[in-house]
Image (cartoon, grey):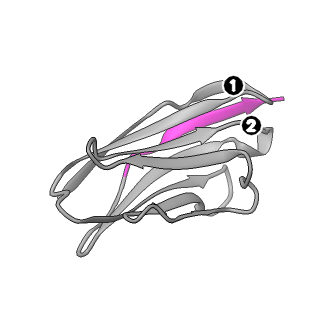
Amino acid sequence: QVQLVESGGGLVQAGGSLRLSCVASGNIFSINYMGWYRQAPGKQRELAAGITSGGSTNYADSVKGRFTISRDNAKNTVYLQMNSLKPEDTAVYYCNVRTVVLNTWGKGTLVTVSS
């Protein structure tokens, strides 16, 4: 099993920044992919950003140029730096970690962007 602990959410004004962190523990021998998904009220969960073990990244079009995903393999941690935040970025952000056999989700951290 893999356990995920997310942190860094909160309330920020439009134009501000936040940095999310997600620490993985447990059976983390072979993490292939780490990502951040988000779910706004009344909407489906969607990918915000992802990063492979090799460092390749992908982003939702809506966050390109504003969000940056990174990972520290030594610390089993993935980060999401969010800049120029907009009210439409308000959502619960979920960490997602995939190994060869597991697909694990964190409990989520709330990001609220006020206008």
Q: Residue shown at 67%/49% (left/top)?
A: 41
Residue 112 lies, with reference to residue 41, above or below; the image says: above
Residue shown at the point (39%, 46%) measured from the top left: 107
In the rendered image, which residue does mark 1 sit on? 12
CA distance separating discs 2 and 1: 8 Å
* Total tally of numbered discs in the picture: 2
Residue 91, located in which quarter of the rendered image?
Answer: top right
Residue 57: x and y in percent read: 54, 62
Mark 2 or mark 1: whose residue is earlier in sequence: 1
27 relative position to 103: left or right? left
Q: Residue furthest front?
A: 54
Cβ atoms at labels 2 and 1 below 8 Å apart: yes
Locate residue 58, reporting x and y percent. Answer: 59, 65
**Residue depicted at 26% across the width and 44% down the height:** 74
**On screen, 9 above or below 65?**
above
User: Magenta span has 21?
Assistant: no
Q: Which residues are magenta?
A: 106-115
Which residue in the structure is indicated by mark 2? Answer: 85
